Amino acid sequence: MNRFLMREAEVETGSRRGKIEGLPGWYFVLVGLLVASNDLSLQFSDRYEWVAFLPLVLVAVHLTLWFTLLSRRRKYLRAVWRSKQALGLVAVLFALRLGLQVGLTKLTDSAAPLHSYTHLILGLVMLVVTTAGAWFDQWLILRVVNRDA
């Protein structure tokens, strides 16, 4: 069980009351888009100039959500991202990104048509893996915390 999440929730509410609600699913898709945005902007920046600003726009959206819609859940969000599972997820995503980049570079060196889609493939894989991994991390933590509530 994530003791940090439990302690922070107890401090905030005085005692543990009821079920803790998780973050909405669209937030995890937005996190996945933020991770994939660099590769997607690199893939399409030669055709569409505005795509180069996609990572900056998504960072601005995240900051806006952080200070508005997610302000009530900020303590839970911090606790989820400070958990061991989340740190493990970050390490796995980093290793996956490096492995995919090396593997796709080797693969696309021999196949010229695939070379033009390297960043698109990387972006889509990172979008799916990040979204699923972040959602699963929250689900696992909340399952344990809510079971004891």
Image (cartoon, rainbow, N blue to C red):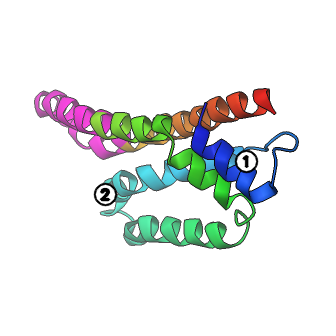
Residue 143 is situated, as x and y percent measured from the top left of the image, at: 71, 29
N-terminal-most mark, 2 or 1: 1
| Residue drawn at x 44%, y 71% as measured from the top left | 56
Relative to 45, 16 lies left or right:
right
- The crowding category of the residue bearing disc 1, from other C-alpha atoms within 10 Å (few below 14, some 14 to 19, many at least 20), is few
Q: In the picture shown, does residue 115 fall above or below 62?
A: above
Q: Which type of secondary structure does the marked residue at label 2 adopt?
A: helix
Res 24 label: 1
Res 143 label: none
Residue 144 is situated, as x and y percent measured from the top left of the image, at: 69, 28
Badge 2 amino acid = Leu
| Residue drawn at x 30%, y 63% as measured from the top left | 46
Of 33 and 24, nearer the camera is 24
Of 62 and 114, nearer the camera is 62
Relative to 6, 2 lies left or right:
left
* Inter-mark Cα distance, 2 to 1: 29 Å
Q: Does residue 114 appear in the picture of this structure? A: no
| Residue drawn at x 66%, y 52% as measured from the top left | 8
Badge 1 amino acid = Pro
Q: Is residue 102 magenta?
A: yes
Q: Which type of secondary structure does the marked residue at label 1 adopt?
A: loop
Residue at image mark 2: 42
Q: What is the quadrant of the N terminus in the image?
A: top right
Q: Is residue 83 magenta?
A: no
Principal SS element in the magenta part? Answer: helix
User: In the image as oriented, which residue stretches furthest toward the right?
Assistant: 18
Residue 28 is situated, as x and y percent measured from the top left of the image, at: 60, 46
Q: What is the quadrant of the C terminus in the image?
A: top right
Residue 39 is situated, as x and y percent measured from the top left of the image, at: 34, 51
- Tell me where the magenta segment starts and ends, as one range: 96-122
Q: Nearer the viewer, mark 2 or mark 1?
A: 1
